[in-house]
């Protein structure tokens, strides 16, 4: 049994957006060095949960304890604390169009850590090499890269400050199956190399199985199942089974608008 300490503890997390109660009491424990993937249908609250965990959004109720500190208070010092020790790969890569690739990767080093441009560029090129991109890519602009290469750059940026925690928001969205698997492999490699704790959200079961130590499913604002990737096929949970098998019919109903 693992003796690793709890890195992140989420307790009774609630969040309302307008009239809709999105999160209804999320409870999660994530141990140091663990990779947890949260799955769920579109609109289930995955992104809202992630934003509350990283400190980009203030929860209405509950706590997010990171290394003993409740960042759900959403103070300026809490945001600085999370920014310093975490990195994030955004769903749409979110690269700055006006900056060269190396400047994108080194953005935090240049603007938050006040590194010299020479040192920041050296670190950026090292991170690009770690995700399989050649040094000359560093001088290109984001518009000159394919979607898969942009995802690699976004991963390089996420790891540039050697974070203790990595957040991945739908890391394989918009990629073909082969490139998606390349990104999944890179995520596994980089998380292990850093010894980081990783939290990912996705609806891609191939990605979830590849990068997760454990998978949790979010449904109607609550975690309804959690287990190892090889246990999910026999979850005995009708919502989980419907989602994993991609069936339209079942307890999970999706709103469909017909003309």
Image (spheres, grey):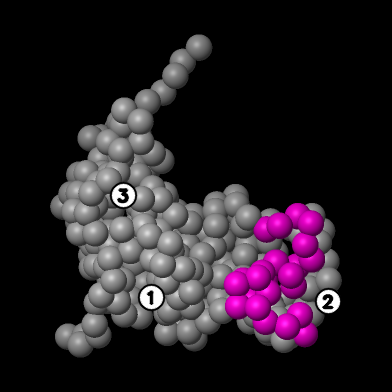
Give me the disc on residue 129: none
Q: Position of residue 215 (x, y in %)?
A: 30, 62
- Among numbered discs 1 and 2, the one appearing first in the sequence: 2
Judged from the image, the secondary structure of the residue bearing numbered disc 3 is loop
Task: Answer whether residue 116 is magenta in the image.
Answer: yes
- Please give the residue where the numbered disc 2 appears in the rendered image: 136
Which residue sits at x=34%, y=42%? Answer: 44
Label 2 neighbour load within 10 Å: few <14, some 14-19, many 20+: few
- Please give the residue where the numbered disc 3 appears in the rendered image: 59
Q: Is residue 126 visible?
A: yes
Q: Position of residue 113 (x, y in %)?
A: 60, 78
Which residue sits at x=51%, y=65%? Answer: 88
Label 1 neighbour load within 10 Å: few <14, some 14-19, many 20+: many
In-front residue for pair 148/47 = 47
**Pair 2/3: label in front:** 3
Q: CA distance from mark 2 to mark 3?
A: 43 Å
Give me the disc on residue 197: 1
The magenta segment:
95-118
Residue sitting at the far top: 259
Task: Answer whether residue 135 is magenta in the image.
Answer: no
- Among numbered discs 1 and 3, the one appearing first in the sequence: 3
């Amino acid at each position: 049994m693992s003796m690793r300490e709890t890195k992140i503890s989420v307790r009774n997390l609630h969040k309302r957006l307008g009239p809709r109660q999105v999160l209804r009491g999320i409870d999660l424990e994530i141990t140091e060095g663990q990779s947890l993937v949260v799955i769920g249908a579109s609109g289930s609250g995955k992104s809202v949960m992630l934003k509350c965990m990283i400190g980009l959004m203030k929860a209405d109720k509950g706590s997010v304890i990171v290394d003993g500190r409740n960042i759900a208070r959403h103070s300026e010092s809490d945001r600085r604390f999370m920014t310093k020790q975490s990195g994030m790969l955004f769903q749409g890569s979110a690269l700055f169009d006006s900056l060269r690739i190396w400047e994108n990767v080194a953005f935090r080093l240049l603007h938050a850590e006040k590194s010299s441009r020479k040192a920041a560029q050296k670190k950026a090129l090292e991170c690009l090499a770690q995700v399989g991109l050649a040094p000359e890519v560093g001088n290109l602009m984001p518009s000159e890269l394919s979607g898969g290469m942009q995802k690699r750059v976004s991963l390089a940026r996420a790891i540039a400050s050697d974070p203790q925690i990595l957040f991945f928001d739908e890391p394989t969205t918009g990629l073909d199956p082969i490139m998606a698997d390349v990104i999944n492999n890179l995520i596994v490699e980089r998380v292990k190399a850093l010894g980081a704790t990783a939290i990912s959200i996705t609806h891609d079961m191939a990605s979830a199985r590849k990068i997760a130590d454990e998978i949790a499913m979010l449904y109607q604002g609550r975690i309804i199942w959690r287990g190892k990737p090889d246990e999910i096929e026999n979850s005995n949970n009708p919502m989980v089974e419907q989602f994993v098998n991609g069936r339209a019919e079942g307890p999970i109903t999706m709103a469909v608008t017909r003309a």
